[in-house]
Image (cartoon, coloured by chain):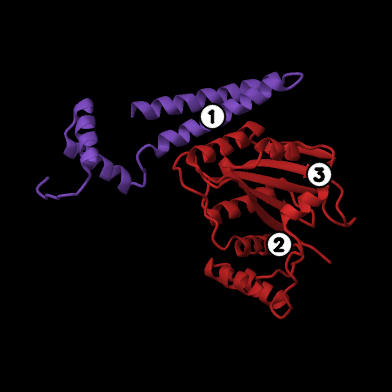
Chain colours: A purple, B red
Amino acid sequence: MKDAFIKIRISEADKSRLVKFAGQSGKSASEIVRSALNETMRGQIAGDKRRKDIAALRRSTNSMIEAFAEKPIDVPNLREIAVQVRQDALRVLTCSMA
Amino acid sequence: MFYGMIIKAIRFRTRSSVSRLINHLKNGIDNDAVAFLSGTAADITDMHSDALAKRSTYSIRHWIISPHEATSRTQMREVLGMIAGEFGFDPERAVIIEHQKPRTTSDAHFTHWHVLVGEIDPASGKVLRCSFDRIIHELVARWSEFKFGHRFVQGVHTKSVIAGLRKRGASEAAKVIQRELGGAEPPSREAFTNAQHQARKRA
């Protein structure tokens, strides 16, 4: 039941961003604030998980570049890295769709 | 002088040349063998880029884990886990390079490890903790010596180390270190900094 009410002070610019984002995502400004509160309370600062997944993808891609530079190329190792890159990419996509 | 495990860290400046650091780490002249156990040189460059984007003064925390007695890779990873816990980072972020070279004393273990972690966490944008780092390095070194059954080294901050171990619930380690090192005089501090040491080597 949503019967409590709070008033928060934010800048005009932040208010405009909130209203604009709410319009784009088809949600009310209250829903966005409630969702941000839930995420923060769960210890998941908005965007952290996504950036962590992207950083992991960057790292596995670096491994792949390194493996290509080896002479001769260690094919089983390269395959293992490619599987890792795929897993990391899937994680980024899953995170984006959540 | 007898050395046990030495853990020290260098905070690499964003204005410094990262390629020079990478060259040093890949260098096979000073070292008989060099192996990347985790991560790549490109990961180190990325750490530097993250710090440049954030305009941070420091880009990379570079730990050197240098044991005097034989230490396995598993034990090294345990030490890394302790460092990660103390400074609040995910050990998966670390680039680990193993160097093997003859040591200045013949009985010393010939392997040491370089552990590099970005000062800026690419996920959260937060900067690595650095408070009381020297005391923490000494604490992790003494705690590791206790865990691995290595001989203890008299450090500069023994009193703080014992108090820190008690605070972390490692009362047995604290008791043993107190008994072994509690009464001894602390050694003198480093006579020269890492920067001075590297400059001498280049000269």
Amino acid at dot 1: Arg
Inter-mark Cα distance, 1 to 3: 29 Å
Label 2 sits on a secondary structure element that is helix
As displayed, is residue A63 above or below residue B195? above
Residue B150 coordinates in the image, percent (x, y): 75, 62
Numbered circle sitting on residue B100: 3
Q: Specify whether disc 1 shares its chain with disc 3.
A: no
Numbered circle sitting on residue A58: 1
Tell me the quarter of the picture where residue B39 sits: top right
Label 3 sits on a secondary structure element that is strand
Numbered circle sitting on residue B145: 2
Disc 2 and disc 1 in contact, CB within 8 angstroms: no
- Give the mark, 3 or 2, whose residue is nearer the N terminus: 3
Mark 2, residues whose alpha carbon is within 10 Å: few (<14), some, or many (≥20)?
Answer: many
Mark 1, residues whose alpha carbon is within 10 Å: few (<14), some, or many (≥20)?
Answer: some
Q: Relative to the observer, which residue lies in front, A88 or B16? A: B16
What residue sits 20% from the left and 39% below the top?
Answer: A15
What residue sits 52% from the left and 54% below the top?
Answer: B129
As displayed, is residue B62 above or below residue A98? below
Disc 3 and disc 2 in contact, CB within 8 angstroms: no
Amino acid at dot 2: Glu
Q: Is residue B195 left or right of residue B53?
A: right
